[in-house]
Image (cartoon, rainbow, N blue to C red):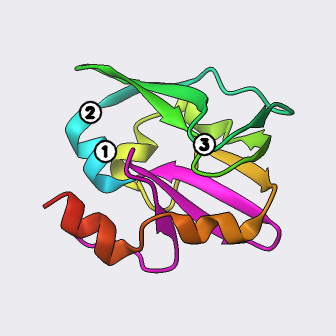
Amino acid sequence: MQLPIDRRYASTHEWALVQGDEVLVGITDFAQDQLGDLVFVGDFTTGVHLKAGDLAGVVESVKAASDIYAPVAGTVIAFNELLADAPETLNDQPYEAWIFKMKVDNIADLEQLLSATQYQSENE
């Protein structure tokens, strides 16, 4: 499993990538592989404030549905609308395709998430 080292990882299989004062959130390659072919990404609400671990939305595959959680506390400011028509993008490019964007309460909270090495050792 090759993991980008430029982001942090939640044990619930979300990744978080800092972009300025915002954070992009997506799912890991491990998560998309476990789910299989994705057919739906949605139920994300912009403008809502979430605590770390709160339900942010869902992804559904031909095999199962899976909840997507906020990796840190903050406000959801955008949903990647491209995924509404092409959810399979998460299968093809799990580290390029973000699902939602957050304005985080405290950027330092990302340090509580797993590094690429820690995430990889948890999921081997």
Q: Is residue 27 above or below residue 2?
A: above
Residue at 43% of width from left, 80% of height from top? 5
Q: Quadrant of residue 43?
A: top right
Circles 2 and 1: CB distance less than 8 Å? yes
Write down the residue under mark 2.
35
Q: Does the magenta stretch include residue 24?
A: yes
Count of labels in the image? 3
For the question of whether residue 53 can be seen, the reply is: yes
Q: Which one is in front, 115 or 62?
A: 115
Query: Could one spot residue 36 in this view of the protein?
Result: no
Instruction: Classify mark 3: helix, strand or loop.
Output: loop
**Is residue 57 on the magenta stretch?**
no
Specify whether 19 is left or right of 64.
Answer: right
- Left or right: residue 97 versus residue 108 is left
Q: Mark 1 points at which residue?
A: 31
Q: Nearer the viewer, residue 28 or 73?
A: 73
Quick one: SS at disc 2? helix
Tag 1 near tag 3, CB within 8 Å: no
Report x, y in % for residue 99: 59, 44
Q: Mark 3 points at which residue?
A: 70
Q: Quadrant of the N terminus?
A: bottom left
Identify the residue at image location x=50%, y=25%: 58
> Which residue range is magenta in the image?
1-27
Compared across the picture, whether 55 is left or right of 32 comes to right
